[in-house]
Image (cartoon, rainbow, N blue to C red):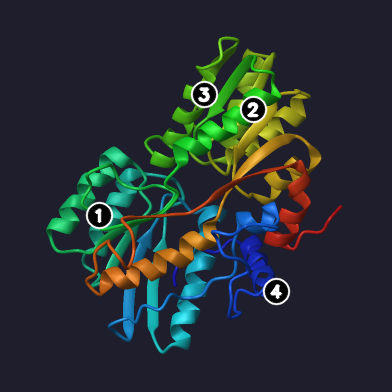
Amino acid sequence: MSGKMNSIFRKFLIVAFSLGIAGTGSAYAKDDVTNVSTTDRAVDFAHNLDDYVPAKKNYNFYFTYKIVHPWWDAVALGMEDAQRKYLEKGIVITYEYMAPEAASYEDQTKRLMQAQDGNYDVIGVDVADEEKISPVLDKMIDSGEKVMTFSSSDAASGCKRIAYVGNTHNYQDGADLTEALCEKLGYKGKIGILVGSYGAPCHEDRAKGAKDTIAKYKNMEIVAVEYDMDSIDKAYELSVDMLKDNPDIAGFVCCNMSNPVGTARAVTELGSEAVIVGMDHDQEALHYLKDGVIYCLGVQDCYSIGFDTLQVAVKIADGNLPGELFPDKTDESTTIIYQEDAEAMLENLYGDVSQ
């Protein structure tokens, strides 16, 4: 593969192997989670290829996503695991896995146009802007390209993309996290929302889930909605400004992996007692969760997203359409974790056993 890999996720990979991803069986069946810990349920390292027999011995894919970020490094590790398992069966898979340093639908459009000249079996995209990118994907399909979406953001409804693998419930994630916040606050107080990137379906959907949930409670008020563009530093600055403008903010809803960290830094620095809920498994965020600065995090199973994306891409490359072999949307899980789960999650994902 090509692309950048954050060093902390190299440790993540080592820990994953120690947990047995190269073994012959799953740690548990996804439909039977009895006696499975919250942290084990949140990220499933144990995967095997299904019994589909690829039609070719060599495949070449192109995947592009919103922004260079540790979240997509975790998705890449699932892809690498699937790639290794195909190689064990004599199937060679190569792929590009590239993204810009800053989220941009213009950049993503340019990358997709260039990919059309690359003779790839399948082109996959994590949609940066639903409104802008979906028509681009339609044109690519009309020109004969095999295009899928993956990761956290699907294309718009009605887009001709062949299939999607990833989070299909971003609205509900935002609603669930916000409901936990509202309950914690006794259903009263001022709330700030940090969204992420303009137009990114996952971020916008989570924010809408948050807004709709807060609207149910007459004693709750949204005082600010800001876009941090997936930047921890920008999220920090915006959170500081929100707290200075509204020192009595009771809580924050953070809709991506970066903004819980920036917000927690701001809350800690200013001595605020605001309650923070947010997304995913950033190592610093997990430490803030462990320390009680962050109340809860919605952790997506990035590893499974990557593994399943590669399996679906092989089937699409062979000319298959959604149906018995794979669905139109392969849904991956989000698990809400709390302070008591933080230490185990840090150890499972990062080998971090610091006290």
167 lies above or below 321? above
Give the quadrant of residue 272: top right
Q: Is residue 147 left or right of residue 256?
A: left
Q: Point out residue 216 in the picture as x, y percentages from the top left corner.
A: 52, 17
Cβ atoms under marks 1 and 4 closer than 8 Å = no
Q: Residues within 10 Å of mark 4 (few under 14, many from 20)?
A: few
Front position among marks 4 and 3: 3
Q: Amino acid at mark 3?
A: Thr
The mark found on residue 213 in the picture is: 3
The mark found on residue 18 in the picture is: 4
Report the front residue among 316 and 73.
316
Quarter of the rendering occupied by the N terminus: bottom left
The mark found on residue 120 in the picture is: none
**Residue corresponding to mark 1:** 161
Q: Amino acid at mark 2?
A: Leu
Q: Amino acid at mark 4?
A: Ser
Q: Point out residue 162 in the picture as x, y percentages from the top left corner.
A: 25, 58
Mark 4 or 3, nearer chain start: 4
Cβ atoms under marks 4 and 3 closer than 8 Å = no
* Element at label 4: helix
Inter-mark Cα distance, 1 to 3: 31 Å
Q: Residues within 10 Å of mark 2 (few under 14, many from 20)?
A: many
Q: Residues within 10 Å of mark 3 (few under 14, many from 20)?
A: some
Q: Amino acid at mark 1?
A: Arg
Q: Point out residue 164 in the picture as x, y percentages from the top left corner.
A: 35, 55
Instruction: Decide if residue 104 is in sight here.
Output: yes
Inter-mark Cα distance, 2 to 4: 35 Å
Q: Is residue 212 left or right of residue 318?
A: right
Inter-mark Cα distance, 4 to 3: 40 Å
**Residue corresponding to mark 2:** 181
Mark 1 or 2, nearer chain start: 1
